[in-house]
Amino acid sequence: MNIKKFGAKHLLNTVGAFLIAAPALVMAAATPGEKAPEFSEVDAAGKTHNLADYKGQWLVLEWFNKDCPYVKKHYGSGNMQALQEKYTGQDINWLTVISSAKGKQGYLEPAQALEVAESHNLHASAPFLLDSDGSMGRAYGAKTTPHMFIINPEGQVVYAGAIDDNDSANPAVIADSANYVAAALDASMAGDAIAVASSRAYGCSVKY
């Protein structure tokens, strides 16, 4: 056997296999102007939520990890709960998602998630969606906590990115920050164009 020739062929086969497999490893992403990725996840109370359930309605998705300093910034200050309360009060659906894998920071069993929802005064439309296998997070390309997405009644993503324009973990900056999510929702509800439809999400990495 020609060892040199065999080695080169083996290398080409390995590279070829990697090139074929690689796209499956790349995270998809929810992109403004495009159809929102499908999802089906069970919340901490045991109810299943599908994207189709929200057809014809506005939907906000928010990624959460209770131990992340940036999540603490927005929950400890009451900023996130105030947004949730304001917009769910306008019949906008708001789902908060935990994509932390079992054994990773932020992972919660259903009973723990219900306790955290209560202790954090969660004002979302449902208790946390528990995406422990990361399927929903990967479909949306959720990279940080928080990472925010807005979906219109036609099922299209209209905003993806950070909650605001200040990536400091200090809650004192919130008052002077431009809130992208609120601006996008307000513009959309008024029938106006969204000035900032995407931004770089900041925060802690999602622990897949």
Image: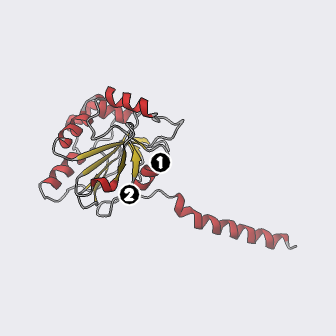
Q: Which mark is residue 97?
A: none
Foreground of the two, 145 or 119:
119
Foreground of the two, 163 or 117:
117
Q: Are marks 2 and 1 in contact (CB under 8 Å)?
A: no
Q: CA distance from mark 2 to mark 1?
A: 13 Å
* Residue at horizontal 75 percent and vertical 70 percent from the top: 8
Would residue 103 be seen by someone viewing this image from the given angle? yes
Foreground of the two, 95 or 67:
95
Which secondary structure lies at badge 1? loop
Q: Residue 70 at what x, y percent from top left? A: 36, 36
From the viewer's perspective, is the residue at label 2 or at label 1 nearer?
2
Q: Quadrant of the N terminus?
A: bottom right
Circle 1 residues within 10 Å: few <14, some 14–19, many ≥20:
some
Q: Is residue 14 above or below residue 196?
A: below
Circle 2 residues within 10 Å: few <14, some 14–19, many ≥20:
few
The first of marks 2 and 1 along the sequence is 2
Q: Amino acid at mark 2?
A: Glu
Q: Which picture quadrant has residue 202?
A: top left
Foreground of the two, 60 or 11:
60
Q: Residue 183 at what x, y percent from top left? A: 19, 49
Q: Residue 194 at what x, y percent from top left? A: 20, 57
Q: Amino acid at mark 1?
A: Gly
Residue identified by numbered label 1: 134
Q: Which picture quadrant has residue 86?
A: top left
Q: Is residue 192 above or below residue 43?
A: below
Q: Which mark is residue 38?
A: 2
Q: Is residue 167 toward the left or the right of residue 1 in the image?
A: left
* Residue at horizontal 52 percent and vertical 37 percent from the top: 104
Would residue 170 be seen by someone viewing this image from the given angle? no
* Residue lying at the far left of the rendered structure: 190
Q: Is residue 15 toward the left or the right of residue 167 in the image?
A: right
The structure's colour scheme is: secondary structure
